[in-house]
Image (cartoon, rainbow, N blue to C red):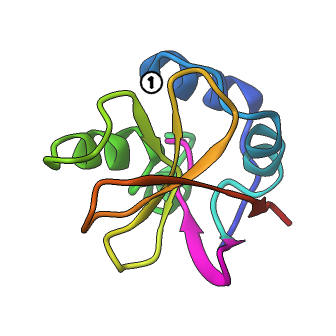
Amino acid sequence: MPFPVSEQRIVDAEEALGRAFPPELRRRLMRENGGEISLEDDDWSLHPVWDPTDRKTMGRSASHIIAETATARSWESFPSDGVSLASNGTGDRPIVLGCADQIFLWEHETGKCLPVEADWL
């Protein structure tokens, strides 16, 4: 279940990851810290930012963007500057690279990063 989060929690995550999030992602996280997004005709579970406000928000944000990105960066072909934004159980990940705002779909089987458009609604 999506829930709002403070901008400070987003800033904390950006600082930990060493980059600002794309503006659309920031707005989405502030409104609904998590939930579903549509990308490439598929639904994805958006990684929330960590929210230790209380037990409920800690539970809802346990699979947060910092932890998910750390896990993904341990995979052989995942880009070292990639930030994992969401998952859908297939192994592929929507990501951002470096400091750019373009969303890419990282394909776990090939290691390729293909530009895509995200529906943040």
Residue 40 among magenta residues: yes
Crowding near the residue tagged with mark 1, few <14, some 14–19, many ≥20 C-alpha atoms within 10 Å: some
Residue in the foreground of this view, choosing between 24 and 51: 24
At 40% from the left and 38% from the top, the residue drawn is 66
Identified by mark 1, the residue type is: Leu
Vertical arrangement, residue 55 with respect to residue 65, above or below: below
Give the side of residue 116 with respect to residue 94, left or right. Answer: right
| Residue holding disc 1 | 17
Quadrant that contains the N terminus? bottom right
Residue 29 position, x and y percent, is 72, 47
Which span is picked out in magenta? 37-51
Quadrant that contains the C terminus? bottom right
Residue 5 position, x and y percent, is 72, 43
Residue 23 position, x and y percent, is 81, 34
Give the side of residue 28 with respect to residue 70, left or right. Answer: right
Q: Quadrant of residue 32?
A: bottom right
Vertical arrangement, residue 24 with respect to residue 34, above or below: above
Residue 68 position, x and y percent, is 35, 50
Vertical arrangement, residue 90 with respect to residue 63, above or below: below
Residue 15 among magenta residues: no
At 74% from the left and 44% from the top, the residue drawn is 25
